[in-house]
Image: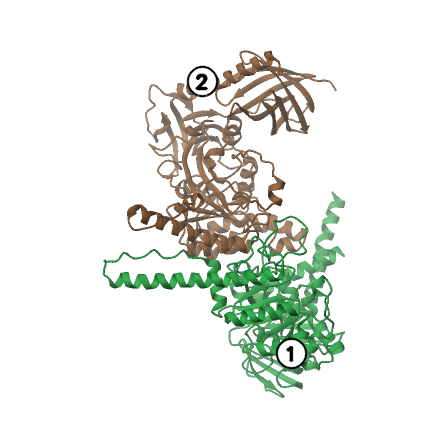
Chain colours: A green, B brown
Amino acid sequence: MKPKITAMAISVALLVLCLSDRLPAAEKAVLLKNGQIITVNSGTVSGGDILIQGTRITKVGKNIPPPAGAEVIDLNGRWVMPGIIDSHSHIALEGDVNEMGDLITAEVDCKDVINPQDINIFYALTGGVTSVHTMHGSANPIGGRGIVLKMRWGKSSAELVFEGAPLTSKWALGENPKQSNDMGMGRARYPKTRMGVEEAIRDEFEKARDYKRKWADYEEKARAAKQSQGKIAPPLPPKKDYRLEGIADILSGKLWVRCHAYQSEEMLSILRLCREYGVKLVCFEHGLEGYRITNELVKYGVAVSTFADFWAYKWEAYNTMPQAAALCANRGVLVALNSDDPERMRHLFNDAAKTVRFGGVTEDEAIKMLTINPAKIMGVDSRVGTVEAGKDADLAVFSRHPLDPFTVCEMTMVDGTVYFDRAKYLEERKKAEEEEKTKKEPEKKNGGEI
Amino acid sequence: MPRRTRYRLFLFSLALIFLSAASLRSEADLHRVWAVKDARIITLSGPPIEKGNLVIRDGLIEAAGANIPIPKDAEVIDGSKLTVYPGLMDALGQSLLKFPEEKLDMARIRAGDFTDKDRGITPGLAAFEYVNLGKAVFEKYHKLGFVAGHVMPDRGVFTGRSAFFCFSDPDRNKALLLKDICLGIGFTPSNFMVYPNSLMGVHSYLKQALSDAVYFDQARSRWLKEPKGQTRPEFNPNLEALADYATARKPVIFLCRNQHDIRRSLGLAAEYKLSYFVADLGGEAFEAIPELKKAGARVLCTVAFKPPGSSLYAQRGRAERERAEKEIYPKNPARLAEAGIPFAFSSLGTDDPKAFVEGIQKAIEAGLDRDKAVEALTKTPAAFFGLDRALGTIEPGKIANAVLVEGELLAKETKVRYAFVDGTRFEIKEAKPGEGEKPTVNVTGKWELAIEGQMGMNLTVEFSQEEAALSGKLISPFGAFDFTGGTVSGKDIAFEISISVAGQDFDLFFSASVEGERMRGSVVQGGAGTAEFTAKRIPG
């Protein structure tokens, strides 16, 4: 087992080192030929081609002639789909994903702790994942800001960030923020009930409104002082409060709210609160009981980012079933299937298949739950989530239909660049293993001679 | 306690206090004029002087040059086989700091009653108050060419304030060059359920605290200037302690565990317009050269050369990590030099001075120019911390910190013969016959020590010896004191204990020669006085 892991590690290293050589020149053209293209927005094109120029898809169709100098990759009838988008993840973050020290931590920001060397970025690529929404944990009613990343393995923290994607605010309801399961050390923190969780959020909204008022007052006084030409002393500005500024960004709609919740009652309750304050609540995370309140979710335009068949891991996560995602989707709720876990992230396509098997959704609908639906939830649907001209060339190539239980992701592209190629990877791993062997053997010989 | 013992205890503490006063007339005061004759002098302020004299008077360099006359009142050292270098300096360390041990009150922790210290927020913590200087410590540094060092607490988020000392006098008031120079900023969250307890929380906390400190400073000075018609701002000792650093009147030192911390630091420094140094604890500055260069950052370079846990090398198993440890990380200083990034060497991560020098030698083997290494231990640290007019080169008027060596400094075979620190000469003892030898005795067990003379009294010591390393516990009427870092070579033992008597701290340096079940030796208190002692093993 061990040498295998070492060899794999070495080949990952090689991959990293080789990346720089593989990057295509700025406007280099790549033609993917003869694939089964799952476009998501306009059906499946059999024996179709995808032309990529620079970082974007410029043409999807049949018999596209390769432009001069284009690299041609023959898909030999393999399946291509838009790169998988994981709307709920915690990868590529350094340190703890929860700031547990305070109840409300709207000031903390995942952007500050992006770890571009997290090996899970590479593993994501091996499962066809090209974008993730990585976020703060669920310990706080209002936690930190989350961020959307592209899996540009080998690039710096700043280069991983999905340009233009809206920033998010992570909220959490239920057992985690009220610390129901915290049996260990730690103070008895407010709140201890679901009522308290909601009240904690409302309190913070009021504080942020006060804070904004103070600044408005100050600005008015400062203007008056300026106009008085020295007769009125300029006022002292209020103290800057990053936490309340974060809350103010929620109230102004600059931050899109992603709210961890399981139970239908608390989802309804928080919906009312968000309506009252005009908060842009885009998605319930997990939302296991969402299927019970589909009308309300549709009315308010709130999506659900959930699991295919993962539940009953704690009391509040009991009341769901493998049909839940399908039930929501059938009633018009925007549904995404997420990983919440670097391991599950590598086979999200299997999870989508489960929704077909148990919930009876169409294959196309299931694929949407991995692509355009999460893209819409993350506000990046104009850039990714379908295979069409004008969109980013983020693609995943599979050996069989992505929902086939025996399918394997063979190649993953981000921005028209191949970041993962299984065949090449295996070749390199084999080479590295052999090199390792030849490196070790002479040492042994020398040892024997001496 | 029997009356007799109590009387002895009284005498002992009197004796200690008397002896510490006696340090005022130590050797340092008797010979204040020295001349090193016919030596090769590396001044670092100009070209090397192939054969010249160095005159030291009253703690300062009086003259250095080819045809400098030898003053009549000088004690002369023949330098014909020696090279004079400016004394080396550790640009940032923490091993000289000794904090009182505190037992964690778990009831308090469980009740959620946390202090700023639990949170790692100690901007007022001053290295000056906790420095542990002493003869034994000095000996360890002097023999490797080190004569001064910059120390700073390194735990937590706002770790504390630094101080720069000459390794000349156990009295910190005399040894001090500058205090409260820098404030340490670390990225290590507390382990408790208290804010901030995550890296992202630490980052946000830092932003808020820096912003608050600037605000506090402005509001307070505004009120002091015109109290009429203005409510005074609430006082906050932490913000007051931060104010100088948050407003860039003084520099901070970012304690960076890896390349990501380095980038984080550069971001914070730019956003809050801080004067700063990057302490490269992870040894990964080479990964951030373009960013460091663009920011014009100054780096304090460590030499442990261990890939941090966040690095890909560490995530990829032992073989990869060891390769990186051997082949990649030791090149860090050379790569900084090549990129023209100013750096000085820090002992953080290699707390023992010997390991520190070995690390620097490794950096030289990995391609760092030796002269550049010397510079990073002399001129550069002096300039970094505002001491370049006082230290760092051999120039008339500067503090007489110099080392006299046989061979080239930092080379493996080189021997340091003398160290001048603050104009005081410290002769580096020739390796005694027996020193460095394998131990021929094992002193593990309990011993009864009888100190002779005026402060005569009996003490018990429990030794624990592992090969040449000696640690143990001194049991005295004043309490029990643990020690580590002692040595055994041949049949000689040496160890240092810091004890606290009547609210005062004393360093006791014991050295003895063992004969069977008995030993005989001496105990030195700081630079102050010596008493003889004998000891015998308590059977059983």
Mark carried by residue A357: none
Q: Is residue A291 left or right of residue B36?
A: right
**Residue B173: percent from the left, percent from the top?**
42, 29
Seen at 67% across and 58% down, the residue is A9
Report in which chain the residue with disc 2 lies.
B
**Residue A210: percent from the left, percent from the top?**
44, 61
Q: Residues within 10 Å of mark 1 (few under 14, many from 20)?
A: many
Q: Nearer the viewer, residue A165 or A16?
A: A165
| Callout 2 secondary element | helix
Which of the 4 image quarters holds residue A376?
bottom right
Q: Residues within 10 Å of mark 2 (few under 14, many from 20)?
A: few
Q: Is mark 2 in CB contact (under 8 Å) with mark 1?
A: no
For the question of whether residue A286 can be seen, the reply is no
Q: How many marks?
A: 2
Q: Is residue A18 above or below residue A304?
A: above
The disc labelled 1 sits on which kind of residue? Lys
Q: Is residue B364 above or below residue A205?
A: above
**Residue B78: percent from the left, percent from the top?**
43, 24
Where does the N terminus of chain A fall, quadrant-wise? bottom right
The disc labelled 2 sits on which kind of residue? Ala
Q: Nearer the viewer, residue B499 or B2?
A: B2
Mark 2 against mark 1, which lies toward the viewer? 1
For the question of whether residue B172 can be seen, the reply is yes
Which of the 4 image quarters holds residue A144?
bottom right
Which of the 4 image quarters holds residue B397?
top left
Q: Nearer the viewer, residue A385 or B361?
A: A385
Mark carried by residue A368: 1
**Residue B480: percent from the left, percent from the top?**
61, 25
Mark carried by residue B22: 2
Where does the C terminus of chain A fall, quadrant-wise? top right
CA–CA distance between discs 2 and 1?
85 Å
Seen at 54% across and 56% down, the residue is B200
